[in-house]
Image (tube, rainbow, N blue to C red):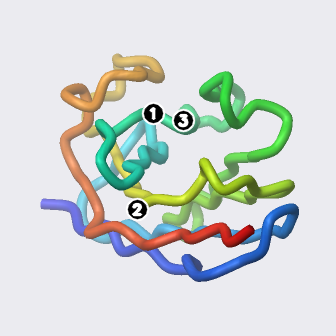
Amino acid sequence: QVQLVESGGGLVQVGGSLRLSCTASGRTTYTMGWFRQAPGKEREFAAGISWSARSTVYADSVKGRFTISRDNAKNTVNLQMNSLKPEDTGVYYCVADRDPGLGISRFDFQYDYWGQGTQVTVSS
């Protein structure tokens, strides 16, 4: 089993920055990423990264503002969020997949493991 623990959420003003971190414990995980869910909306893909970190995928809504990275030696994945907007507000979930053969997916059902979520609030 794998446990994912997120940190780094909080309250920030429009245009500000936050850095989310997720630490994985347990068995090896491969593709990792972040989903988010705004109040009253469906959960959506934000960013994903391959095990090698050579491939990254971003939602159009965050492209150019968010950067995903990982450190396999520390079993961590990070999401640097810059130029934050009110529409970035929501709960952010760290996800991981246990299948080394799968690529980065925008679909939540692909991911085997989920963190408990961390709140990000962007205030105007």
Percent x, y of residue 66:
75, 46
Residue labelled with disc 2: 91
Kind of element beneath mark 1: strand
Percent x, y of residue 93:
38, 57
Q: Relative to 73, is 96 above or below?
A: above
Front label number (1 vs 2)? 2
Residue labelled with disc 3: 48
Q: Crowding at label 2, few (<14), some or many (≥20) Cα neighbours within 10 Å?
A: some
Circles 1 and 3, Cβ within 8 Å, touching? The answer is: yes
- Which circle marks residue 111 in the picture? none
What amino acid type is highlighted by mark number 3? Gly
Percent x, y of residue 46:
54, 38
Give the side of residue 121 with respect to residue 65, left or right.
Answer: left
Q: Earlier in the sequence, mark 2 or mark 3?
A: 3
Residue labelled with disc 1: 45
Kind of element beneath mark 2: strand
Q: Relative to 24, is 60 above or below?
A: above
